[in-house]
Amino acid sequence: MIKIPTRPVLGYPIAVTDYRSAVAWIAERGLARDRAYAVEAANTHVLALARHDPEFGAAMRKFDLICPDGQPLVWSLNAQLPEDEKLTDRVYGPTLMEKTLHGEGAAKDLNHFFLGGKENTLTNLRQHFSDRNIAGTYSPPFGEWPEGEFEKIVNLIRDSRAHCVWVGLGCPKQELWIAKHLDQLPPAVYFGIGAAFAFHAGEVRQAPALVQKLGLEWLFRLAMEPKRLFKRYLVYNSLFLFHTLRDHIRG
């Protein structure tokens, strides 16, 4: 099977990969149907939270592939790589989703399931990916789930025969849910995909490419949603920088 090398960033194995290799890895695991796999596109918030919160950190250690979503993660990886192996781009979660659904080769045979978001968001996603193999969608109740909800979701995924399950429940809920149930979920590749649903459904604007390249997407999103994101970026960007510097000093 395809193996992707990793390097540690804040103590977590971050994949040294590009979109093409990540999509090939996903297609191979999804079509194998041998077990449930977990994939995360991690940014500074995800890694700082994993380092700071033991429960979330333990959940992230169950993920099989952690891609460098944030540009600071790419810089951290490249600092550890020889010149001819350095990454030229990050693996941004929404773009990874787009490239997987519109993938070539083996990825063309993948069926997809969208879990999470509002009904109208899922309707917009179906329209956005209307030319793809969408096996099913489900919008679970907001807040605490009723008894039997997990079994219902498992049955929907199993009956759909999906190879890829895109979980948009928000961070950290989606990662905790995937990790907790990984051994009970039907064979497929499960993604903690966060804001990608809202982006592809046309509900939230993405940062321009140059802003993303400069590692300033957080600033763009903060300007768009200051009340919701101020605490996240103030706290977790600072924690990421603090732990990165401390790890560097410690060697």
Image (cartoon, rainbow, N blue to C red):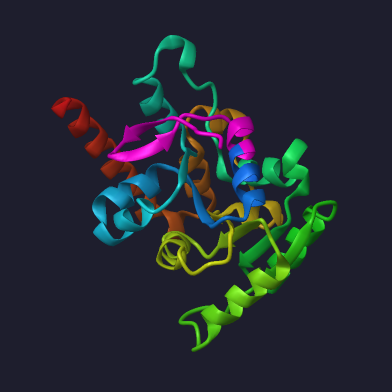
Residue placed at 35% from the left, 55% from the top?
231
Residue 181 appears at what percent x and percent y? 45, 68
Q: Is residue 64 magenta?
A: no
**Does residue 21 appear left or right of residue 216 in this picture?**
right
Q: Magenta segment range?
A: 1-24
Q: Is residue 21 magenta?
A: yes
Quarter holding residue 77: top left
Name, please, the residue furthest toward the right. Answer: 131
Quarter holding residue 189: bottom right
**Does residue 76 appear left or right of residue 23 in this picture?**
left
Residue placed at 72% from the left, 47% from the top?
101
Residue placed at 69% from the left, 65% from the top?
121
Name, please, the residue furthest toward the bottom. Answer: 147
Quarter holding residue 187: bottom right
Residue 184 appears at what percent x and percent y? 48, 69
Name above or below for residue 247 compared with residue 152: above
* Any part of residue 138 in sight: no
Instruction: In this rendered view, identify the residue nearer to me: 179 or 204.
Output: 179
**Does residue 160 appear left or right of residue 146 in this picture?**
right
